[in-house]
Amino acid sequence: MNKKKRIMKILAALTAFVLIGVVLFFVNAFLGNPVSYLLARHSASQYIEENYPEADFDIDGISYFFEDAKYSVSIKSPSSIDSHFTIKTDFAGRIKYNSYESDILKKGNTIERINRDYYDMVSAVFSSPVFPYETSHAFAKVYISYDEILNSEQNGVILTEELELDKIYDMKEVGEKAGTVILSVRDEVSVEKAAEILEKTKLLLNSAEVYFNRIDFILEEKHSPDIKVEKRINLDGFPAAFIGSEDLKERIELYK
């Protein structure tokens, strides 16, 4: 009887150890582990000291992503709004990825900041009660290109080589030069209605000191989600300079 009890206790202990091991395995897989967090911090700290000794980078936070089993270390400069990037390490603290080049050297953060500011300005108008139309899509972006062959004055684009880290841009100028509004409205489909919506949209945006270079505009009939829309007007890259002109309807006819 005592022997049987001892065997049962051993089996129970083994079962408990196995269960604890399984739990720890899943916790480590989905949440990471404290040792690897410390290794990630140490590796990232050493990396920025060795590679960017003149910069004032600090570790802003560490996250674990179970999708790729990597620890993501956020690096940030307190003196520069565009100087932040990510270092990723594995469970042993080995550096596997560094976004410094794309985020800072190639102006990725500056591009994101400009687009976010412009998007917020345009969205504020479209979400305002003063905007009278039913929309299915309403947002905006700034056309920024790495292609140095492009002539930014002729093509309505800002080249990355023109951008400066931390510069506070005049969003009116940015919008006029390279802003693109993307707007899809559900209403009566006609050239007259399209002209009315374009003119009203430009008026409301300009009144809020938001300007754009061109608009991707779709006008389609009001419909339920399961009904295919047959009738629509689609204007891709329609110049803002055309809106308000005396021949606006004729230009819509040519573009649609």
Image: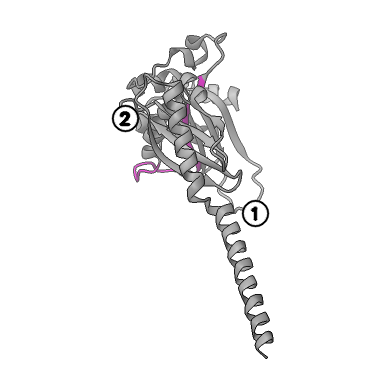
In this picture, which residue range is highlighted in magenta?
A: 127-144
Looking at the rendering, which quadrant does residue 229 occupy? top right
Number of dots carrying numbers: 2
Residue 149: % across, % down: 57, 8
Dot 1, how many residues are within 10 Å of its Cα: few (below 14), some (14-19), or many (20+)?
A: few
Of label 1 and label 2, which has the lower sequence position? 2
| The N terminus: image quadrant | bottom right
Residue appearing at x 47%, y 37% in the figure: 73
The amino acid type found where label 1 is placed reads: Asp
Q: Which of the 4 image quarters holds residue 252? A: top right
- Whether 225 is drawn above or below 46: the answer is below
Residue hosting label 1? 226
Q: Residue furthest front?
A: 2
Residue that numbered label 2 is attached to: 78
Q: Is residue 136 above or below residue 179?
A: below
Neighbour tally class for label 2: few under 14, some 14-19, many 20 plus, Cα within 10 Å: few
